[in-house]
Image: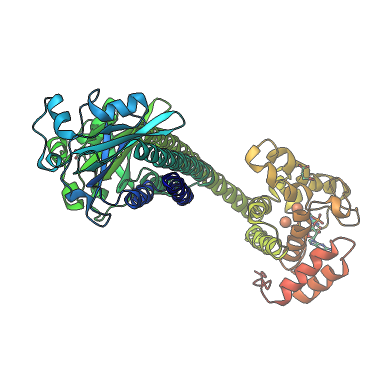
Amino acid sequence: MRLIQAAQQRAEHLSQINRLGRELSSTFDPETIYRLMCASLLNFFPDVEAIIISRFEAGSSRSTRPILFHDGLEEDVSKIPAIPLEPPGRGSQSEAIHTRQPVLINDYGAFRQAMHSGQGSSGAEVIQSAIYAPMLAKDTVLGVLNLQHRRRNRFDEADGELLTWIANTSAIALHNAELFQQTQKKVAQQQALRMIDMAITASMDLGVTLDVLLQRVVQIQDVAAAAILLANPETLTLRFTAGRGFRTDMIERTYLHIGEGLAGRVALERRIIRADSPAELAHHWTGDPFYEAEGFCCYMAVPLIAKGQVQGVLEIFDRKPFPGDDDWLAFLEVIGGQAAVAVDNGRLLADLQRSNTNLSLAYDNTIEGWSRALDLRDKETEGHTLRVTEMTVRLARAAGLPEREIVHIRRGALLHDIGKMGVPDHILLKPEALTDEEWVIMKQHTTHAYELLSPIAFLRPALDIPYCHHEKWDGSGYPRGLKGEEIPFPARLFALADVWDALTSDRPYRKAWSKERALQHITSQSGTHFDPRAVELFLAEAFTGEMEQPSTSS
Ligand code: C2E
Ligand code: SIN
Ligand code: SIN
Ligand code: FE
Ligand code: FE
C-alpha cells in the first residue's frame, strides 16, 4: 500500500515537473522563470518559510545575487528580511556547489554553533531546517536553490531528489533564456552597426548620419541621452553638433576649448573619461551644470579618432548607473570608431562639395563672360547666345533629358559659336554672301570649338553642341557630315533654336525674317536639315507661346 502510494506520488511529482518544464520553455524572461519556479516549489512545499534562489552573476563565479521569496509570491521581495549569504568556501551553499549534490540541514541551531556564527539575523534565528540544491545546466552551476523551514528535520532524501529535478529544469530554462538574450543583444548590435554603416555611406549630410548614430547609441547602450561634440582643428574647440534624448536644449550650448572641461580633456588626452555619480560630475564639470536640470547622474565621454585626428567627442548621459559590462564598453568603442569615420567622411565630402561648387561657379562665370564677349564682337547678334541657350534648355526639358545632362547642354549652348573667335572680322561681319574660300574658313568655327574646348576636362561633356550644331539630319551639314541619330541629340535640339533665332534676327548679311516665314522655313526643313522629332518638340513649345521671342529688329 505504502509502495503504491509512493509510486503514485512520484508519478504525480513527475507530471508536475513536466508541466513546469513546459511552462519554463515558453519564456525567455528570467523573472518569469523565477516566478514559475516559486509557484511550483510552493506547490510541493506549501509550508516553507522562505525560498531563496541564489544566482551567480553572468560571467562571474564570485558573487551571487539572492532572490528571495517568502510567504507566497505577492509580497514585495525587497521587504523580506535578508538572510545572510554564507561566506564563499564555507557552509552548505558552497558544499552544494562543490559536490553538485543536494545538501540537507536538519538542525540549524546545532549547525550554527558548529560554524561559530551565533550572530544570525532575527529572520535566520527561526530557521531550523534547510535544503540546498545546485542549479546545474550544461555542466555549470548557475546558482543554488534553497528552501528553509521553522521545524527541525523537515526535509529528506526524496525532497533532495525532487529539489534537484526542479533546480536542474529551471537551470536549463535560465541558461536558454540568457543565451537567447545574449543572441538578441548581439543581433541588435550588429543591426545597429549595419544601419550606421548604411547611413554613413548613403547620407551626404553629416547631421543626418550623426542623428542615426546617436539614436542607435541611446537605444542599444540603453542610456538616457547622447551627444556629439565636433572638434574644430583650427580654433581647437569642441562644439555641440548632434544630440538625442535631452529634456532641455542646454546641451546645445556646449562650447569648450580642447583640454577644458570633461569633454575637452577627453579630446586632449584621447581616452574615455567617466563620472559615475553627481558628486564626481560636480567635481570635474567646468561649465554650466545642466546635468542637474536634466537629472543625469552619470556621464561618459569617448574620443572620436579617425586618421590619427580627434574628430570630436561622443558623450553619453544617464539617469541611472551605466550597465558597464565588458560588452557594453566594447560596443561603445566600436560606435565611437564609426562616429569618427562618419565625421571624417562628412568633412571630406563637405570640403569636396564646397570646392566643386566653387569650381563650377568659377567656370560658369567664365563661360558666360566668354559668350557675352562673343556676342559683343558681332554687335547685331547681341543677346543671341542667351536666347538660344534658354530655348535649348527648354527643349531639352520638354524632351525629358535629366538635369545632370542639361547642365552640360547649357554650357555647350553658351559656347556654341566660341569657334567664331577664329573667324576674321572681314568674314564674320561681311554684309553680303560669303565666297567659297570664306565659307571654308567660316565652317571651321565648329572644329575650332572642338580644339578649344576638348582639352578642358570640365567642358568635355559640353562639346556636342559647339562641335555638332551645324550637322544636318540628311547628312549634308558640317564639319563631319554626320547623319540622323549620329548627330548628338542636344546638337539636334540646339540647331532649331540657333536657326530660329538667326532667322528672326538682323544679320550683317540680311534683315530679320518674320516669325511666320521663319516657322515655315523650319517646318519645311523637317527631315532634311532638322530631326523631325526635334521639330515636333519645337512646334509644341512654339505654340504654347513660350517660344515667342522678343522682336530683335534693332
Ligand atoms: P548665324 O548667322 O548664327 O546662322 C546660324 C544658322 O542659321 C546658319 O548656319 C543657317 O543654318 C541658319 N541661317 C541663318 N541665316 C539664314 C538665312 O538667311 N537663310 C537660311 N536658309 N538659313 C539661315 P550656317 O549657314 O552654317 O551659317 C553659319 C554662320 O555663318 C552664320 O551664323 C553666320 O555667322 C555665317 N554666315 C552664313 N551665311 C552668311 C552670309 O551670307 N554672309 C555672312 N557674312 N555670314 C554668313
Ligand atoms: C560637456 O562635456 O558637455 C561639458 C563638460 C564640462 O563643462 O566640464
Ligand atoms: C566629340 O566628338 O567629342 C564631340 C561631340 C560628338 O560629335 O560626338
Ligand atoms: Fe555656328
Ligand atoms: Fe549661332
Q: Residue 46: image x %, image y %?
A: 29, 52
Quadrant occupied by the C terminus: bottom right
Q: Residue 83: image x %, image y %?
A: 18, 39
Q: Residue 382: image x %, image y %?
A: 63, 60
Q: Residue 226: image x %, image y %?
A: 32, 45
**Nearer to us in this view, 319 or 105:** 105
In this rendering, would 294 be left or right of 34? left
**Nearer to us in this view, 529 or 225:** 225
- Answer above or below: position of 78 versus 56: below
Could you say which quadrant of the image residue 330 lies in?
top left
What colouring does the structure picture have? rainbow
Residue occupying image coordinates x 40% and y 44% = 220
Residue occupying image coordinates x 74% and y 55% = 490
Using the rendered image of the protein, determine whether residue 232 is visible from the camera's viewpoint.
no
In this rendering, would 17 be left or right of 95? right
Q: Quadrant of ligand 1?
A: bottom right
In this rendering, would 67 be left or right of 480? left
Using the rendered image of the protein, determine whether residue 65 is visible from the camera's viewpoint.
yes
Could you say which quadrant of the image residue 154 lies in?
top left
